[in-house]
Image (cartoon, grey):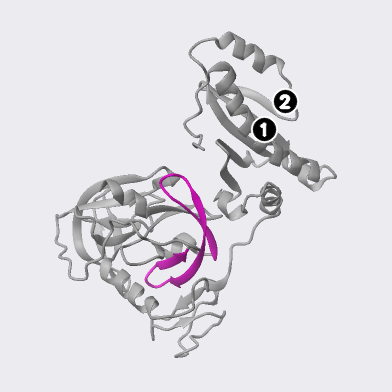
């Protein structure tokens, strides 16, 4: 199971995070529709924390599946396979792979509690394996790395009750979509009445006239605050899609430094970076440096043995004549953090923080 993580991805949108995966023989990343609902472009992060822009190219809300296309991505190495005739039985071992709560890649183990649990108009695989927010869209696998299902939900206020979309549903969606041509990055909605795809916003299927939910085409509307912050990221040369980590929250690496931008107590815009751990020796010299060196408009601090650089302004300030200065300060904090973490490592022997990314 060790190489499975190379084929399992974190899906990051302006609303939150989920999981996705690639299977042998297919280049698209598979996830739940509800993970990417309201988005046509999302970020996909691999186990090494590298991020890629992905276009949402197929959604089937009824089945709760979506396919993502990453330009240039070729799925040449994967240990996740599809077997149409796979035998699934109650009590067999099952493994949930994904990124619960947006954490790093995680595997949980359980058993199949029901091979065909009816809910609504569909049947699902039920498991007692731990399923948490963020696992949605990730693969349910057997011990051989064969897809059993796609994690989709769990009951609230219930332990050991998780559900997955059947592997046969995934195979059908992949088979149907593979019949299309020249659809590399076009957003399409599948009609479950006739299995055809509609590309233009419409209340009816272009092929059979079946009623469609027009809200499927609606995209998440960014707040003024989000537009302001993402303008700063654009100035920094970062695709805003790759910086998103949830609603009005951004997290990305500038060089080796992790940068976080978020709202604090609904009043303040905060940008911060956990740069280095405190050294084992010569700490007095470092503390003197932190107290004496001026890094305005930023400030240096220590929290739980980590050195931070931070910046904070009131949200109302982004509506004033100081807006462009604030935007410039956000950009420069990222650059400053990337310089300072190397300085503290070279000068005071401070190890990089666990959040840092290797060059």
Residue 158 visible (yes or no): no
Give the side of residue 29 with respect to residue 332, left or right. Answer: left
**Marks 2,1: beta carbons within 8 A:** yes
Q: How crowded is mark 2: few (under 14 residues within 10 Å), some or many (20 or more)?
A: few
Q: Measuring from the top left, give residue 32's x and y in whole percent.
A: 40, 63
Q: Is residue 150 above or below residue 192?
A: above
Is 54 contained in the magenta span? yes
Q: Which of 19 and 256 is in front in this view?
A: 256
Q: Measuring from the top left, give residue 151's x and y in whole percent.
A: 33, 58
Residue drawn 66% across the image and 48% down it? 233
Give the side of residue 154 with respect to residue 227, left or right. Answer: left
Q: Quadrant of residue 346?
A: top right
Circle 1 sits in a helix, a strand or a loop, which is it?
Answer: helix
> Residues in magenta?
40-69
Circle 2 sits in a helix, a strand or a loop, which is it?
Answer: loop
Residue farthest toward the right in the current orientation of the protein = 321
Give the side of residue 142 with respect to residue 241, left or right. Answer: left
Q: Is residue 94 above or below residue 60?
A: above
Q: Measuring from the top left, give residue 4's x and y in whole percent.
A: 30, 51
Residue drawn 61% across the image and 34% down it? 338
Q: Tell me the distance, in whole angstroms, between the alpha carbons under discs 2 and 1.
A: 9 Å
Is 112 contained in the magenta span? no
Label number found at residue 295: 2
Give the side of residue 337 with respect to residue 53, left or right. Answer: right
Q: Which of marks 2 and 1 is nearer the N terminus?
A: 2
Residue farthest toward the bottom in the current orientation of the protein = 208
Q: Is residue 65 above or below residue 160?
A: below
Q: Which residue is identified by label 1?
A: 336
Residue drawn 68% across the image and 33% down it? 311
For the stretch drawn in magenta, the main secondary structure is: strand
Q: Measuring from the top left, give residue 8's x and y in whole percent.
A: 37, 53
């Amino acid at each position: 199971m060790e190489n499975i993580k190379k084929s399992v991805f974190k899906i990051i949108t302006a609303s939150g995070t989920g999981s996705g995966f690639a299977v042998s023989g297919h280049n698209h990343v598979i996830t739940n529709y509800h993970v990417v609902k309201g988005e046509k472009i999302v970020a996909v992060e691999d186990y090494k924390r590298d991020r890629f822009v992905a276009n949402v190219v197929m959604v089937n809300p009824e089945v709760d599946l979506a396919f993502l296309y990453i330009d240039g991505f070729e799925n040449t190495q994967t240990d996740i396979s599809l077997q149409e005739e796979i035998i699934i039985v109650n009590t067999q071992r099952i493994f949930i792979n994904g990124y619960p709560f947006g954490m790093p890649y995680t595997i949980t183990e359980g058993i199949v509690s029901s091979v065909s649990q009816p809910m609504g108009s569909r049947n699902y695989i039920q498991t007692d394996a731990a399923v948490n927010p963020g696992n949605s869209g990730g693969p349910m696998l057997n011990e051989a790395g064969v897809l059993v299902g796609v994690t989709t939900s769990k009951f609230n206020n219930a332990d050991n009750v998780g559900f997955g979309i059947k592997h046969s549903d995934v195979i059908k969606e992949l088979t149907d979509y593979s019949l299309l041509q020249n659809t590399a990055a076009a957003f399409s909605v599948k009609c479950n009445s006739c299995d055809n795809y509609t590309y233009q916003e419409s209340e009816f299927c272009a092929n059979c006239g079946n009623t469609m939910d027009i809200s499927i085409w609606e995209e998440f509307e960014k707040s003024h605050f989000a537009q302001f912050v993402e303008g700063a990221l654009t100035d920094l040369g970062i695709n805003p899609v790759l910086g998103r980590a949830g609603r009005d929250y951004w997290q990305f690496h500038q060089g080796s430094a992790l940068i976080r931008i978020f709202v604090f107590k609904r009043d303040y815009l905060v940008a911060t970076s956990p740069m280095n751990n405190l050294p084992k020796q010569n700490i007095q010299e470092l503390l003197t440096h932190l107290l004496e060196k001026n890094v305005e408009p930023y400030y240096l601090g220590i929290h739980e043995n980590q050195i931070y650089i931070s910046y904070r302004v009131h949200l109302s300030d982004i509506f004033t004549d100081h807006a462009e200065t604030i935007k410039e300060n956000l950009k420069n904090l990222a650059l400053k953090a990337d310089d300072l973490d190397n300085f503290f490592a070279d000068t005071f022997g401070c190890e990089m923080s666990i959040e840092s990314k290797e060059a």
